Image (cartoon, helix red, strand yellow):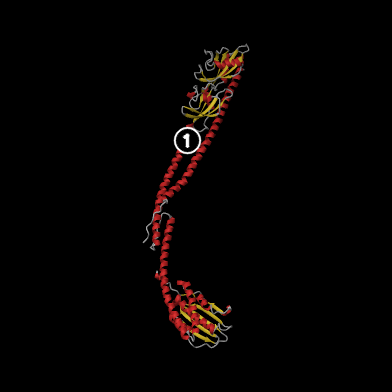
Amino acid sequence: MAAPLRKSTGSLSISVLLGLLIAAALLPPLLLSVFLLDRNNRAQADVVATLAEAAAGAAVQTVDSQLQGMITALRSLSTSSSLNEGDLRRFYVGAQQALAGTASYVIVADGDLNQLLNTRRAFGAPLGKISDPEPAEHALKTGLPTISDGFLGRVANRWVFNIILPRVQPEGDSLLLLLTQDAEALSSALTVENLRGGWNAVIVDNNGTVLASSLMSADVGKPFFLGEEASAVGPVRRSIDLDGKDYELVAKASELSGWKVILWAERDAIERPLERTLRLLMLGGLAMIAVGGLAAWLFGRQISKSVRRLARDAHRLGAGEEVAAMSYPVRELTTVSAAMADAAAQRRAAENEIRFLMREVAHRSKNQLTVVSSIANQSARNAESVAEFSERFQQRLMGLARSTDLLIAGSVAGVELRELITVQIEPFRPAEDTRLQISGPHFRLSLQAAQTLGLAIHEMATNAAKYGAFSQQSGRLSVTWSLHGDELELVWREHVPDLKQRSSRKGFGTQIIERMLPGGLGAKVERHLHPDGLEARFTFPVANIRPTDKHQEER
């Protein structure tokens, strides 16, 4: 009876091992992805900050270029002949034509800051004083072009800025030429398309007032919401904490006007894509692990069932029971099951063969005892002394032993005829190879035939050594056999030039040849004594001497 299966302690199930394997396969790439994503985000943040600096610098250059262009245009207008001649109407018309499509307007004011003309209004309309007197007074005082900060123009009724150029007329009176432009016109200098989402840009004047914004035009004219700290002179890049929120800020100042281009972004808005990506990555990784764990549990369950069934088959195999090959979901387990079924079949075959061989041993032992008894009786009957009996008995036992060795080596497959003849003649053969010839086709003898024929050949070799081919230096022996249909013919031919007369007494060898070969093997025996030696011809029915597969019948 097969022993019950024992559950091992301290070990893990296949499902758990598969789950751990899946986790080990997924977690390192997942953690590595998170690490690389974080590193990539930091690198991108540095790149974006660098791009922001470059964008701020480019915006400052654009603003300065725009202001410089306005100063150049104002200088060109100041050289107008109509202005030198005091013909303001003609100057008004020429200025309107020169500035058409530029969103810029010209104002001419006297030394008391009274507007003499303004191309925003019809010529001759009452205008009053200029809206922003402080930079105008500074221009009159220094005699240099001056750029105002933003202010709300009374005539334009919107936020504007002025470029102011002082001029002394030929009569000695002072005039001010002002080129005014809407502050919103500066917004074209602000480009954040190359920056990652969340970044905005503003232009702030020296008073901290927003002149242009990429986010909302409503911010123009208002103080920048990050306050004076944002527009203060300091590092190009810095962080600001306002009302519990962190802002990343990049600022660049204009050397021409002192205005600042500020790029800013809320840190949460910058990091939100990373957090969203990390969240999706973690959720996806957990989902993959969950699906993998479920698959591992299902696969492990199937494999565990298969392994337990294989274990039961292994116990049946150990108990000598029959094991049938089974088909399993895993190909390797199916292979193991087939191997166990083959092993069970081979074990049964081996047990059957052992039982057959045991019966054969018992049978052969009885036969051997019978043969030994016959050898002993014949040796004693023909011996003239105890010494002669002992010598003959031992020689015949040795021949029987050599045949027995071949029988054991051949087992149920039989004994090769050439080997049997060679082994029996070997103790008597002469040193010269030319004196012995053994030839014939491949043929296997049954065990019984080999035992009987081995004794006969031993006796003939003994007689050849005493009286025949091996008794003289010039003697030769030829043993040949051939197949003729259903018969095997074996010819023993001795060649002895000086043949001695043999005794006519029939010994044990003669009895084996004349009685046991015909009686036990159905052989036909012909003996001829030629002048130059003995010729013995044996004809055996092949069916009587060929091995039969009896052990197959036992199975």
Q: Is residue 494 left or right of residue 351?
A: right
Q: Residues within 10 Å of mark 1 (few under 14, many from 20)?
A: some
Residue 63 visible? The answer is: yes
Q: Is residue 352 above or below residue 375?
A: above
Q: Is residue 430 above or below residue 111?
A: below
| Residue furthest out toward the front | 386
Q: What residue appears at the point 41 percent right and 67 percent down from the top-left corner?
A: 351
**Which quarter of the figure is the C terminus placed in?**
bottom left
Between 542 and 424, the residue placed more toward the observer is 424
| Residue furthest out toward the right | 170
Between 72 and 31, the residue placed more toward the observer is 31
Residue 87, quarter of picture: top right
Q: Is residue 268 above or below residue 551?
A: above
Secondary structure under tag 1 reads helix
| Amino acid type of the residue that numbered disc 1 sits on in the rendered structure | Pro
Question: Residue 165 location in percent, x, y?
Answer: 59, 17
Between 536 and 386, the residue placed more toward the observer is 386
Residue 486 visible? The answer is: no
- The residue indicated by pointer 1 is 273
Question: Residue 223 location in percent, x, y?
Answer: 50, 22
